[in-house]
Amino acid sequence: MLFIDESAIEKIKEIRKQENFGDDYFIRVSVTSGGCSGLTYQMDFDNELQENDQVFDDKGERIVTDLKSFLYLCNTTLKFSGGLNGKGFFFDNPNAARTCGCGESFAL
């Protein structure tokens, strides 16, 4: 399962409205090679499901990931932190053994 925090939902709704994305758009998250720690998170809006997509619904928000990325993201929560010291969107991933200082990448 993938989860989404209330703070992230509010920011997603705000962005969706600004960008004129309809209700058919969902959040797509994935993991790619790269970054200081070896693996990097990717997040974007999408409206097309792919063949091996894993689809989750948490608090009325749809989160989609490919099967390979799900192996790294299982039980991860998407969060948002604003303010002067805020991180923006970030992932609270219980599978990550370590993360880099900027929080953009992780390793298992």
Image (cartoon, grey):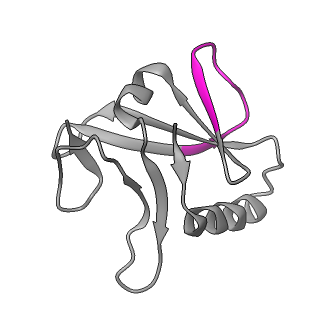
> Residue 79: x, y in percent?
48, 61
> Residue 4: x, y in percent?
55, 54
Residue found at the very far top of the displayed protein = 51
Kindly indicate the quadrant of the structure image that contains residue 86.
bottom left
Is residue 89 depicted above or below 26 in this figure?
below
> Residue 52: x, y in percent?
57, 15
How many dots with numbers?
A: 0
Q: Which residue is drawn at 30% across and 53% down?
A: 104
Question: In the image, is 38 to the left or to the right of 78?
Answer: left
Q: Residue at x 17, y 54 (%)?
A: 100
Kindly indicate the quadrant of the structure image that contains residue 54.
top right
| Residues rendered magenta in the picture | 44-56
Q: Quadrant of the C terminus?
A: top left
Is 37 magenta? The answer is no
Q: Which residue is drawn at 63% across and 13% down?
A: 51
Q: Nearer the viewer, residue 30 or 78?
A: 78
Is residue 53 depicted above or below 103 in this figure?
above
Q: Nearer the viewer, residue 62 or 44?
A: 62
Is 50 magenta? The answer is yes
Is residue 18 depicted above or below 61 in this figure?
below
